[in-house]
Image: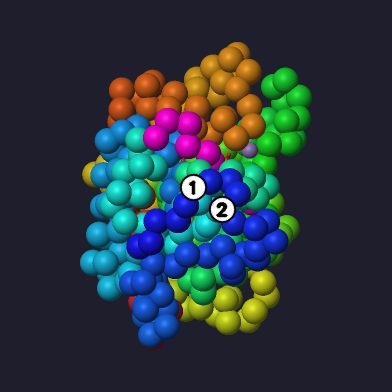
Amino acid sequence: MPTPAATPSALPSRLSLADRLLVAPEVGAALAARQPVVALESTLISHGLPYPQNVEVALASEAAVRESGAVPATVAIHGGRLLVGLDRAALETLATTPGVAKAARPSLAAALADGGWAATTVSATMIAAGAAGISVFATGGIGGVHRGAVGGGTGPTLDISSDLEELARTPLAVVCAGPKAILDLPLTLEYLETRGVPVVAVGTTEMPGFYSRRSGVPAPLSAPDEPAAARLVGTHLALGLGSGALVCVPVPAADELPLEVARPAVERAIADAGAARVEGPALTPWLLARVAELTGGASVRANTALIVNDARVAGRLAAALAR
Ligand code: PSU
Ligand code: MN
């Protein structure tokens, strides 16, 4: 992969999204041959998990995609370009560089104009993947409507992740283990329904709860198995409605954080974040790190396992969609 220059003035500001895409040769070849490709995001590497679990999970996710018969394309920003497909050195850089930026749709231009390294959230990864022609993407847990976003506690914060708007306007299948457990799950589902995003749980009629297999909240749609989920998602994408589809897969049983362990840790972390006045894009990483502390690292084990599992399922979904 060519290494782009990292000076702010390296690229003219008028460049389009397509002009700024730098697709790795293996990914480009797979797309040209209509072979299955799975996009992976990088904010979970830079902001979501501690080192060295973050780089281990990045490599394990890529391996899981390959085992499923698809080509992985981890997305990040460097030198004013959207990189689609990273080498190992790039993954290490994202995992170890302090203060790497977190780029979402609203902060995409700032990250590109800066010229340095930035990790992409679900929204920015969907933008890059969609522009590159990739139709399946795996993450850990999507962002959503934060608790207290529309009232309660200290009043409405209106903190709603740009992930939800992206799902409404970019036609990709996104595989996750449910919206992150730190969020308001019923309100997140209401938002996705309003914005026309089908949400399908695989192998269960309940929404997967991210760290936990269960959430206690019914899933809007349910598919008994992966082929059924692939048919549903394939049908949605073929209609050309413009929105993406969310596929939710429970964390593997051996690594889950039982709901009775996860729930009090999440509630305590949210209270602590309020007391520490953490807000904006810093909130989600702060809460994930706090839950990790409160559970003695058990949440990190669940988080890494669910990310790799999602990548594996996304690979199989991409293979099914390519047939
Ligand atoms: N899944 C994880 N860990 C993470 C994320 C997803 O297991 O850290 C990241 C994704 O990049 C997602 C972001 O888009 O968290 C949501 O951030 P926010 O709530 O600030 O929109
Ligand atoms: Mn937010």
Tell me which corner region of the image, top left, top right, bottom left or bottom right, holds residue 186.
Answer: top right
Q: How many numbered badges does the structure rendering display?
A: 2
Tell me which corner region of the image, top left, top right, bottom left or bottom right, holds residue 34.
Answer: bottom left
Mark identifier at residue 10: 2
Name the residue carrying label 1.
6
What amino acid is at disc 1?
Answer: Ala
Q: Split into 4 quadrants, where in the image is the C terminus?
A: bottom left
| Mark 2 element type | helix
**Residues marked 2 and 1 touching at CB (< 8 Å):** yes
Q: How far across and down, in percent of the image, does residue 1 sit?
A: 35, 62
Mark 1: few/some/many CA within 10 Å (<14, 14-19, 20+): some
Q: How far across and down, in percent of the image, does residue 212 sit?
A: 39, 41
Q: Is residue 241 left or right of residue 171?
A: right
Picture layout, residue 206 above or below residue 293: below
Span colored in magenta: 97-105
State whether label 2 is within 8 Å of ligand 1: no
Q: How far across and down, in percent of the image, does residue 6 sit?
A: 49, 47
Q: Residue at x 70, y 61 (%)?
A: 14
In the image, 202 versus 80, the foreground residue is 80
Q: Residue at x 60, y 22 (%)?
A: 278
